[in-house]
Image (spheres, rainbow, N blue to C red):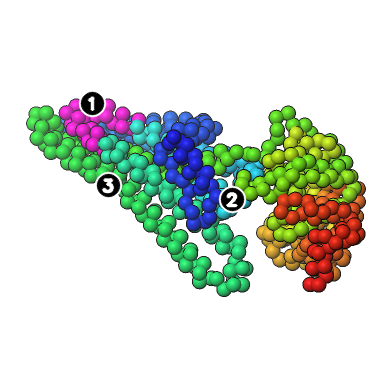
């Protein structure tokens, strides 16, 4: 029941805004720890070598107090300068060797950390590329971004340096205990008596500490989501003079994050404070008992050596407490990272899926029903077919299901009921690559990438030559404005096509679609952002593009679709009318009323 409750809580909070926190795990996930081991195994050669150097370096360094003890107890009283200088030389050599091995070890650990970052981030990015639209529909993109960059950076040190240091510090404790008992079993026993007290304290606060850092993770995620949303929407913000309100929201989010961060710091610092306090008490007790046992149980050199070992014994304990704090913090980030990697890829090739051969373009929808949220049906029992070379327009009011039809045809979502067939083949039974590679999709808000004009056009065909790019641009009508740019086709544009107009961005998107030479063409409000003059210029290119292809056009301006082979009027998820422009006008139904409404605008 507890597991079911957690799953329900996760599901309920998957659709969250920038100011909504995600679930908190009650315990460290053993499954996630096993995932960590897989990434660590990828850099195990570097880690094993680093560990070996660290062990050798520490063993050499731990011999230092023995040289000091012998120098004080033997060389100084007997004025044996040769022995004194020999011990000093050994001590100096031990320090140099220990430092040198430590430096090499740091380089190896850095390489291992970089390898872990690369592997986790690449796996995460690969998975994000495969996740369906529904995943991105239900989450602020800033919450996704924070997992790919900041969170991965945060966990790399814990999975490389942290693992190495943990093993080293545990071995150091074992080695130091060995040396302490070699020097004085009684004082060694006094030294380790504080460990049970510290262990009990850490066990008591561990769950509080974990949840505290998970809350910090949530607040960081919220903050990042809002910052990205605000940057993307800065034009709207300034247009509606909402700057002060946004600053207030940012102030609240930052305060929330800082408040949770300070709470987590308080809890984490109690571990450090308790470790320091217990170590200092033990350190004092060792000297007190050492003086008490000085004659004849202990010499001054023995007391000095034990003081050194006692300090060295508690130093790795303090380091382990810090490593533990780092690990708890990292696990709160790893939970979010691995949750994303564990997201099911709902849109994937079915078992036994075949490669789609050359598409002719016969499209059929048979009794198709679909819902985005599993509750409200966006399409209900939709039936139609489109023949090769036909141009089919889809019109209707906002929210009627027009875009949903073309999204299902491209298999961006899986249908709930019915079948979508192309050339008689169920698209659920073919590979996604072979299906989508034969489709050209133009959206109302076509995304352009940072790069040159030519780079963005070539996105439709990666091996396209400069001549093919120019020919496609000329056919669409984009060449005229490209030639006027400072560097022509080599002109750089910024993210989302900054530096050129909305209409010019659409023309580039048309060119990108054309050069991909699709068999099925989808134009979803593709000319809505182009002015009338530019639209007239591009219509001839569109007609050329549509020749020999099955085309689906969603358009707000009905004047652009009157020549389509057929027009479908859809409302409330159902096709209410279908026919040519003349046939639908003669029916004087929904389409007729829509045309009259536009004519009077």
**Which residue position holds label 2?**
138
Question: SS at mark 1?
Answer: helix
Mark 1, Cα crowd under 10 Å, few <14 / some 14-19 / many 20+, is: few
**Disc on the earlier residue, 3 or 1:** 1
Task: Answer whether labels 2 and 3 touch (C-beta < 8 Å).
Answer: no
Q: Residue at x 13, y 31 (%)?
A: 298
Residue of label 1: 182
Q: Position of residue 153 (x, y in %)?
A: 50, 46
Q: Image quadrant for the N terminus?
A: top left
Q: Can you give x and y, in whole percent of width and height, for residue 397 in the image?
A: 74, 60
Q: Residue at x 8, y 31 (%)?
A: 295
Mark 3 lies on a secondary structure that is: helix
Sequence-wise, which precedes: disc 1 or disc 2? 2
Foreground of the two, 407 or 208: 407
Give the CA separation, mark 1 to mark 2.
63 Å
Stretch in magenta: 171-198
């Amino acid at each position: 029941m507890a597991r079911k409750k957690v799953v329900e809580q996760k599901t309920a909070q998957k659709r969250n805004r920038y100011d909504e926190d995600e679930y908190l795990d009650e315990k460290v996930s053993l499954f996630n720890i096993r995932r960590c081991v897989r990434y660590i195994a990828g850099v195990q050669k570097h880690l094993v070598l680093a560990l070996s150097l660290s062990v050798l370096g520490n063993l050499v360094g731990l011999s230092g107090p023995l040289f000091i003890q012998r120098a004080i107890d033997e060389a100084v009283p007997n004025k044996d300068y040769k022995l004194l200088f020999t011990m000093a030389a050994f001590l100096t050599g031990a320090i140099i060797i220990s430092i040198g091995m430590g430096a090499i070890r740091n380089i190896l650990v850095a390489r291992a950390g970089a390898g872990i970052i690369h592997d986790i981030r690449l796996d995460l990015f690969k998975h994000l590329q495969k996740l369906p639209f529904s995943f991105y529909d239900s989450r602020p993109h800033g919450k996704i971004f924070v997992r790919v960059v900041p969170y991965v950076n945060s966990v790399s040190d814990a999975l490389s340096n942290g693992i190495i240091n943990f093993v080293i510090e545990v071995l150091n404790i074992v080695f130091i205990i060995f040396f302490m008992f070699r020097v004085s079993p009684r004082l060694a026993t006094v030294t380790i008596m504080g460990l049970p007290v510290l262990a009990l304290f850490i066990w008591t606060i561990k769950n509080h500490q974990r949840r505290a850092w998970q809350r910090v993770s949530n607040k960081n995620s919220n903050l990042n989501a809002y910052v990205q949303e605000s940057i993307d929407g800065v034009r709207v913000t300034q247009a509606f003079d909402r700057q002060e309100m946004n600053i207030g929201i940012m102030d609240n989010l930052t305060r929330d994050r800082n408040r949770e961060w300070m709470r987590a710091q308080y809890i984490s610092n109690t571990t450090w404070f308790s470790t320091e306090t217990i170590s200092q008490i033990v350190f004092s007790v060792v000297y007190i008992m050492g003086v008490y046992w000085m004659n004849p149980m202990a010499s001054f050199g023995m007391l000095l050596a034990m003081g050194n070992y006692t300090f060295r014994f508690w130093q790795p304990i303090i380091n382990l407490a810090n490593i533990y704090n780092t690990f708890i913090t990292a696990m709160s980030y790893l939970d979010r990272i691995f949750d994303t990697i564990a997201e099911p890829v709902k849109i994937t090739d079915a078992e036994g899926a075949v490669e789609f051969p050359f598409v002719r373009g016969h499209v059929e929808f048979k009794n198709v029903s679909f819902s985005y949220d599993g509750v409200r049906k966006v399409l209900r029992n939709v039936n139609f077919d489109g023949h090769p070379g036909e141009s089919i327009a889809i019109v209707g009011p906002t929210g009627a299901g027009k875009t949903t039809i073309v999204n299902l045809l491209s298999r961006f979502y899986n249908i709930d009921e019915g079948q979508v067939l192309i050339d008689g083949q169920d698209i659920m039974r073919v590979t996604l690559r072979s299906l989508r590679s034969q489709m050209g999709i133009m959206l109302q808000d076509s995304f352009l990438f940072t790069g040159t004009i030519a780079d963005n056009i070539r996105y439709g065909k990666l091996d396209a030559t400069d001549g093919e790019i120019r020919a496609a641009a000329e056919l669409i009508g984009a060449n005229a404005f490209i030639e006027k740019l400072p560097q022509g086709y080599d002109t750089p544009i910024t993210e989302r096509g900054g530096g050129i107009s909305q209409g010019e961005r659409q023309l580039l998107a048309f060119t990108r679609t054309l050069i991909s030479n699709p068999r099925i063409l989808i134009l979803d409000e593709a000319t809505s952002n182009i002015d009338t003059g530019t639209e007239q210029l591009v219509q001839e290119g569109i007609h050329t593009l549509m020749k020999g292809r099955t085309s689906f056009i969603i358009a707000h301006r009905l004047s652009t679709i009157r020549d389509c082979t057929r027009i479908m009027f859809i409302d409330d998820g159902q096709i209410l009318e279908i026919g040519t422009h003349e046939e639908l006008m003669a029916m004087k139904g929904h389409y007729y009323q829509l045309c009259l409404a536009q004519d009077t605008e």
